[in-house]
Amino acid sequence: MRRQEMNGFEIYKKIGDDVQAIYRSRLLTEILLSLNEGSKKLSQLREFK
C-alpha cells in the first residue's frame, strides 16, 4: 500500500474543526476565570495572550 502525502492545507482541512474547538474552549475558560476573579475590565478580557 502506498502512503499518501498530504500538505499542510489538507491536514488542516481534515482536523481544522478540532483545532478551532480547542482554541475556542481555551478562550472561553480564560474569560470565565477572569469574570470569576472580578478584577478585570472588559478591555482586558479582549486581549490575546
Image (cartoon, rainbow, N blue to C red):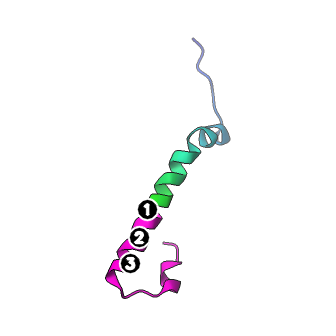
Q: Report which quarter residue 15 is drawn in.
A: top right
Q: Circle 1: is it few (<14), some (14-19), or many (20+) Cα within 10 Å? A: few
Q: Circle 2: is it few (<14), some (14-19), or many (20+) Cα within 10 Å? A: some
State the quadrant of the N terminus. top right
Instruction: Name the kind of residue labelled 2 in the image.
Output: Glu
Q: In this view, does 6 lie to the left or right of 34?
A: right
Nearer-the-camera pick, 44 or 35? 35
Image spot of residue 38 (x, y percent): 35, 85
* Residue topped by disc 2: 30
Image spot of residue 49 (x, y percent): 48, 72
Q: Is residue 43 left or right of residue 26?
A: right
Instruction: Name the kind of residue labelled 3 in the image.
Output: Ser
Cβ atoms under marks 3 and 2 closer than 8 Å: yes
Q: What stretch is highlighted in magenta?
A: 26-49
Cβ atoms under marks 3 and 1 closer than 8 Å: no
Q: Give the residue displayed 32% in from the left and 82% down from the top.
A: 37
Secondary element at tag 1: helix
User: Which mark, by number, is residue 26?
Assistant: 1
* Residue topped by disc 3: 34
